[in-house]
């Protein structure tokens, strides 16, 4: 007669925790951080654009001088 193998005991079912309605939404707690990042990006874009306009102006000035002197 063969002995039946015992299966390992089933672990107790885990209780799902219900979300705490008073807890803040994780995304809403970073709204200020996101705003800071967006503001910094906007300033970086403006700075880059200013530097590029200055570069193009100087290149145009250089070309104008070269054309004048021949």
Image (cartoon, rainbow, N blue to C red):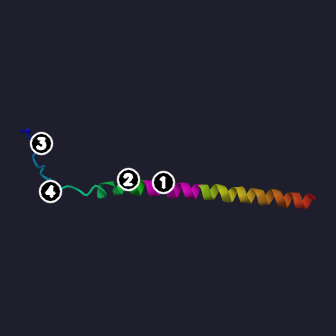
Describe the element under mark 3 as helix, strand or loop. loop
Describe the element under mark 2 as helix, strand or loop. helix
The residues tagged by marks 4 and 1 sit, at their Cα atoms, a distance apart of: 38 Å
The answer to which of marks 2 and 1 sits earlier in the sequence is: 2
Give the total number of marks visible in the rendering. 4
Q: Up-down: is 61 above or below 9?
A: below
Residue at (29% x, 55% y) in the render: 29
Describe the element under mark 1 as helix, strand or loop. helix
- Location of the N terminus by quadrant is top left
Q: Extreme front residue here?
A: 1
Which secondary structure is most common in the magenta stretch? helix
Q: Magenta segment, which residues?
A: 37-47
Residue at (13% x, 49% y) in the render: 14
In the rendered image, which residue does mark 2 sit on? 33
The answer to which of marks 2 and 3 sits earlier in the sequence is: 3
Q: Which mark is residue 7?
A: 3
The answer to which of marks 3 and 4 sits earlier in the sequence is: 3
Q: Position of residue 69 (x, y in %)?
A: 92, 58
Which is more toward the observer, 38 or 69? 38
The residues tagged by marks 2 and 1 sit, at their Cα atoms, a distance apart of: 11 Å
Which is more toward the observer, 25 or 11? 11
Q: Which mark is residue 40?
A: 1
The residues tagged by marks 3 and 1 sit, at their Cα atoms, a distance apart of: 60 Å
Q: Which mark is residue 18?
A: 4
The answer to which of marks 4 and 2 sits earlier in the sequence is: 4
Q: Residues within 10 Å of mark 1 (few under 14, many from 20)?
A: few
The residues tagged by marks 2 and 3 sit, at their Cα atoms, a distance apart of: 52 Å
Q: Position of residue 55 (x, y in %)?
A: 71, 55
Describe the element under mark 4 as helix, strand or loop. loop
Q: Is residue 62 left or right of residue 17?
A: right
The residues tagged by marks 4 and 2 sit, at their Cα atoms, a distance apart of: 28 Å
């Amino acid at each position: 007669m063969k002995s039946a193998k015992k299966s390992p005991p089933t672990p107790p079912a885990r209780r799902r925790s219900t979300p705490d309605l008073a807890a803040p939404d994780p995304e809403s707690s970073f709204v200020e951080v996101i705003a800071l990042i967006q503001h910094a990006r906007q300033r970086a874009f403006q700075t880059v654009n200013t530097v590029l306009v200055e570069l193009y102006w100087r290149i145009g000035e250089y070309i104008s001088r070269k054309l004048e002197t021949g």
